[in-house]
Amino acid sequence: MSLTSSTHAQKRPGTWSRIRAISARKHGHRVAALLASAGVVSLAAIIPATAASAAPPPPAKGIDPSVAAATAGVSLFYTAANGTVWTAAPGGTPTQVSNGKVVGGVSAITAGTSTIVFGTASGGAVWMATRTGGKWSNWSSVGGNVTSKPGAVFQGPNAADYAVFARGPGGGAVWGRDHTTAGWGPWHSDGGQLLAGTGPAAAAINGTYLLVVGTNKQLYIAHAGVTGFTSAGGTTTVSPALTSVPGALVGFMRGTTNEAYYHKFLSTTPGWHSMGGTLGSGLAAAALGTTTYTLGLSAGTSVYRDTGTWTTYPPKLSGWVKVAG
């Protein structure tokens, strides 16, 4: 008796569950029919099934990354294979910089509370997008007719004081455009003759300085608008990087054996010195106080960073650490 009672007790819940499920389905069909007859669209028709978010694309092989440093943190930027631009905190999930596509690498700066990224469009004009309060603006044209990735610099003291430079057509001179509180000034030539496929790097310290690769694959530096280009030593075939720490400019380049090098531009610290690594792109750099952040692509599609502390010389370098891709 107890066994029979137990068996019935086990079966009945399953039976009633099936009955309730069938009843619910019928009731649901009746409700849906009533809603449809009343002209009401069901929620299932307007709320699609949740789809998994597509993974961010990796950096395109061989295209220089960029970096912007601010007290709030460091942001890296890279161009994907389809030309879209992406940004992330090191180790974070990349998000797209507005819409639109660029040709080659980008250059990013911090200006006041905003981050600005510059890229070159397929027609040769320079374009920019600005992030303020966490939101990106649409891309807007800065004009020009350039043949390289841009090199941008915050000049100060006002948040509106910055400039962008790139390799021009024809002889490959550097062309630049300055922005102030009055808006954009005209494009102007800063001279030089850059190696095709390379762009200028820019940094500010008592004026704006440009570091470029000449057609002989040698590096040259100039105080923009004040001096012409003079030899900076070193040999490379890709775009260099330039930033400043208190009291000095610091340049970075990838040598002919794909190893990274740094140069502190003081008479007491001459020449280029190895940072190691095996890189597959040009370099980017930004500084926050006495700390530099140098980025480069591996031989594949991963972004690596080397952090330097310049309170002493030689600097203390972290070594290359993968941060994206």
Image (cartoon, helix red, strand yellow):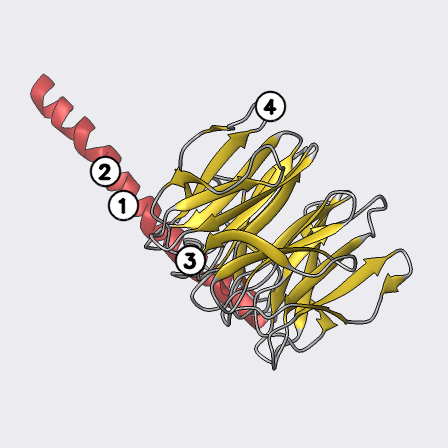
Q: Is residue 256 left or right of residue 316?
A: left
Distance from the alpha carbon under mark 1 to that under mark 4: 75 Å
Q: The residue under label 1 is which amino acid type? A: Arg
Distance from the alpha carbon under mark 4 to that under mark 2: 75 Å
Q: Secondary structure at mark 1?
A: helix
The answer to the question of whether label 2 and label 3 lie on touching residues, with beta carbons closer than 8 A, is no
The mark that comes first in sequence, 2 or 3, is: 2
Instruction: Identify the residue at horizontal 54%, vertical 69% (top origin).
Output: 36
**Which of the two residues, 218 or 260, is positioned nearer the viewer here?**
218
The mark that comes first in sequence, 4 or 2, is: 2
Residue 18: mark in rendering: 1
Distance from the alpha carbon under mark 2 to that under mark 3: 49 Å
Distance from the alpha carbon under mark 1 to that under mark 2: 6 Å
Q: In the figure, residue 275 lies in which quadrant?
A: top left
The answer to the question of whether label 1 and label 2 lie on touching residues, with beta carbons closer than 8 A, is yes
Label 2 environment density (alpha carbons within 10 Å; few <14, some 14–19, many ≥20): few
Q: Secondary structure at mark 2?
A: helix
Q: The residue under label 4 is which amino acid type? A: Thr
Query: Compared with residue 123, is residue 19 higher up or lower down, i.e. above or below?
Result: above
The mark that comes first in sequence, 4 or 3, is: 3
Q: Secondary structure at mark 3?
A: loop
Residue behind mark 3: 57
Residue 188 percent across, percent down from the top left: 77, 70
Residue behind mark 2: 14
Label 1 environment density (alpha carbons within 10 Å; few <14, some 14–19, many ≥20): few
Q: Secondary structure at mark 4?
A: loop
Q: Is residue 163 visible?
A: yes
